[in-house]
Amino acid sequence: MQYDLVILGNYTKDTIVSPSGTRSVDGGGFNYGAHVAAMMGLKTAAVTRLAREDVRVVEALKRLGVDVYPAYTPDSTVMRLYYPTTNPDERVLTVTKTAGSFTPDQFTELWARAFLINASIRGEVGMDVIMELDRKGGLLVGDLQGFIRVVAPDGTLRFEPWPEKAEVLAHVDILKTDAVEAEALTGEKDMEAAARRLSELGPKEIVLTHRDGLLVLAGGEFFAAPFLPKKQVGRSGRGDTCIASYVSKRLSALPAEATRWAAAVTSLKLEAEGPIKRSVADVEEMIRNSYASAPTAVVRDRKSS
């Protein structure tokens, strides 16, 4: 089957704990991202692994028009996300169960203009799957979190050195990261410097999210746009929503427009828990009302100027 976007990642059964209370949410980057692509009218496939007891997530995506290819496993990935303060970039993640690893045969019959790897932890997507996707010729998009986060003996997620870094990133066209992950991998606190370091490893475009917005490095230029939610309720899934909206728009638009679009979509998602449930008209209205006075900043990459 041919798609605009194929997005893959394990479903995560999330418990979110923050100063505002405790909530249970159906998570997973594939879930947040598929909602975005469906909203935008793209022909979308979602490939995931989960326990059959959580089939409601599959059925919900099907109702949106997404083709879902699930592998049913003994357990879903179970995650606890603890936000000790109101700073959305401060969090402690704990995993107690996982749905295991993807296999190349799950993608044999799937073709797409872009494949978005949106794993949660290292081990979900191996080099065998990356090579299977790469041979198909579409854009290969990766989320850094699924490669540098590992489960420690106490169940917490932590960053560890990534031995396959050079091998994997040589195949990635667009890499998404957040500011914390970028610093962990590159050692650079400055976001522009971190993005440049990451681009030197192979990806043609870097999408970097942070508490205030996103920064994109593409074609030797930086593009930036702020997040402008009326209220911030749904921090979990921020980056997943952002990269899915950027890639979905990037299939038909230049980086500057895709950056602004991703910022607007992510802002609307931040206003509510769970995947975005707004419309393209809502996004367009927000761009007209909120981004006219905050246009995408374009900064020449100092290294290439």
Image (cartoon, rainbow, N blue to C red):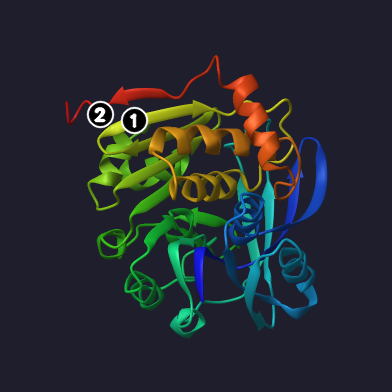
Of residues 277 and 30, the one drawn nearer to the viewer in this rendering:
277
Residue 39 shows in this picture: yes
Q: Secondary structure at mark 2?
A: loop
Q: Secondary structure at mark 1?
A: strand
Check disc 1 and give the amino acid type. Answer: Phe
Image side of residue 234 versus residue 88, left or right = right
Of residues 11 and 111, the one drawn nearer to the viewer in this rendering:
111
Residue 295 spot, x, y in % from top left:
48, 20
Residue 188 spot, x, y in % from top left:
32, 36
To which residue does mark 2 refer?
301
Residue drawn at (47%, 39%), measured in percent from left and top?
258
* In the depicted structure, whether residue 243 falls above or below residue 47: above
Specify few, some or many for label 1: CA neighbours under 10 Å numbering under 14, 14-19, or 20 or more.
Answer: many
Number of callouts in the render? 2
Check disc 2 and give the amino acid type. Answer: Asp
Task: Say whether disc 1 or disc 2 marks the residue closer to the N-terminus.
Answer: 1
Residue 84 shows in this picture: no
Of residues 43 and 203, the one drawn nearer to the viewer in this rendering:
43
Cβ atoms under marks 1 and 2 closer than 8 Å: yes
Residue 182 spot, x, y in % from top left:
39, 43
Residue drawn at (66%, 65%), measured in percent from left and top?
66
Q: Quadrant of residue 263?
A: top right
Specify few, some or many for label 2: CA neighbours under 10 Å numbering under 14, 14-19, or 20 or more.
Answer: some
State the separation of the CA atoms marked 1 and 2: 6 Å
Check the image and name the residue furthest to the top: 293
What number is the disc on residue 149? Answer: none
Residue 96 spot, x, y in % from top left:
66, 67
**If the image is split into quadrants, where does the C terminus sit?**
top left
* In the depicted structure, whether residue 234 falls above or below residue 5: above
To which residue does mark 1 refer?
222
Residue drawn at (70%, 35%), measured in percent from left and top?
282
